[in-house]
Amino acid sequence: MMRSRPQPVRLSLGIGGRSRSKARSARSAQLFGAVGMRSERRSGQKLWQRLRAPLQILGALAVLLVINLYVLYYRHGTSLPALLKQAETGRALSARLSGPVGTPPQPSRPVRKPKLLPPLPDFPRIVEQPLHASDTLSELLSRASVPPRQKGELETALQGVRDPGGFGPGQSLTFFYDHEDRLQAVDYRLTSSLAYHLERVQTGSADRFVPVKQTQPLVVSTQRIEVKLDGKSDLLAAITRVGETPALAARLYEVLACEFNLYSDAQAGDRLRLLVEKQHLGERFYRYGRLLAVEYVPATGGARTRRLRAFLRSEGSPVNAGAAPGASQHYYSDNGDSLTRSICKAPIQWSRSSRPAQSSQPVLAGERGRWALDYQTEAAVPVVAIGGGKLRLVPGRAGKPQTVFVVHPGGLESSYGPLGRLARGLTDGQNIRQRQVLGSVATPTGREPPHLRLQVRAAGRIVDPSKLKATREPGVPEAERAAFVAQSNDWAEKLARSDEPVIARAGESR
């Protein structure tokens, strides 16, 4: 039996084979290392995602813990020791809690500051109506001659603010009318410290009354005021220097309008003393009441030497006596003589002019006996009648300046022109009061400045208006003169005393 010969084993591992094997081993190690690193990274990310939310919560709790420790133990006023000390004394725990020492703190309501109204303008007509339990709103507005359209607007506005219990004693309605007798504002007073001021404002294409609540007490007082004129035409500046409004200067002018022109005739050193009622809401001036007395004291050595006094006749006088054109009809001298004459001076309502001092002196123009007084003034300033009479209107072209005529008793006739706009409601042949507004100065169409020309005819002939002789109107009736003189003497004493205190009206306090 023959034996097989063993085959020789061939070794293929040489130097080149060993190097390739090592390279493969290195690549395998790198591959396994990269896989291991990626797996470790993934496991770390998964661990962070699991721990992220708890760590954020722990961080927020740590911040809150630090804030609470600061507020409760270190911050002044809110720390536990400070709170315990406040609780022991019973004082306020915050700005909204108050109370006396030793008592539990009480909540205090925040104080709302009331809306402050500016002072009211000097309305020429004011009507005050006291209210009674039996009054109805419709009857009150009809009694005050409120036009139908405004009546509906006012009823709507007042329904929202009127007393739920209805009208009663102590309540009043005050109506304020402008120079064209249009209702502009209403005061509804419920108590001495509660009222509503309803102002007529334009909202869109319609007008309505907007109420503003007033919670300050109404104080009515009588004050003595004295001014000294530093020069000619210084009336407005002198009134402003003592803290009053130009409306008071307009009242002084109207009261003395038939005696002389305060804007142009007064001289340096002249003095004016007056007693006037003033209304305040709290400590703030609201509006003027009645102008009770005026004393004009000329300077020593001046052109005028006669002292002039004017006293209001209280019986039947309006609540704002002195404010309306023609106010002189309510005032009399010491002995009861009227301060109103049949013909007054200037036909311009200087209280509505922005520069009355510069334009109040007329220029006398005359040619072949055709005399006229020419007043240089601004456009749109109101023109008033120098005396009462019947109105005569001459038809003119629409949009063109017009001239109007007033026929006075005694054969006098006055003409005023050019007027750009006539006063509302004027009709031919109607009766005109002295110093009633006829219209306004026209805007010039050429180089000529705005002006008013006053011309007067006597028995058909044109005369010099500055030389007209006017008769004085009747004074206080003899049956009432003793009471008037007693009242005027009392007011004269108050005018003469420079230390005269403020006089509060009965039932009111300052």
Image (cartoon, rainbow, N blue to C red):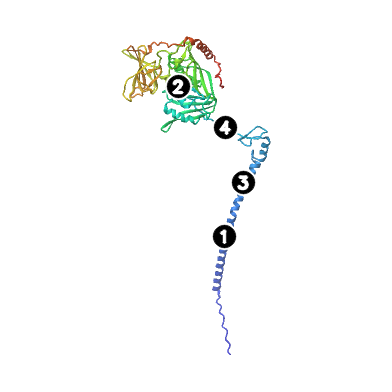
Residue density around tag 4, few if under 14, some if 14–19, many if 20 or more, within 10 Å = few
Q: Is residue 256 left or right of residue 496?
A: left
State how far apart marks 3 and 2 are (Cα): 70 Å
Q: Is residue 279 above or below residue 74?
A: above
Whether residue 232 appears in this view of the structure is no
Q: Are marks 4 and 2 in contact (CB under 8 Å)?
A: no
Mark toward the viewer: 1 or 2: 2
Residue where numbered disc 2 is placed? 125
Q: Position of residue 28 (x, y in %)?
A: 56, 68
Q: Is residue 86 above or below residue 2?
A: above
Residue where numbered disc 1 is placed? 42
Q: Quadrant of the C terminus?
A: top right
Q: Are marks 4 and 1 in contact (CB under 8 Å)?
A: no
State how far apart marks 4 and 1 are (Cα): 65 Å
Q: Secondary structure at mark 4?
A: loop
Nearer to the camera, 178 or 61: 178
Q: Of label 3 and label 4, which has the lower sequence position? A: 3
Q: Which mark is residue 64?
A: 3
At 56% from the left and 61% from the top, the residue drawn is 38
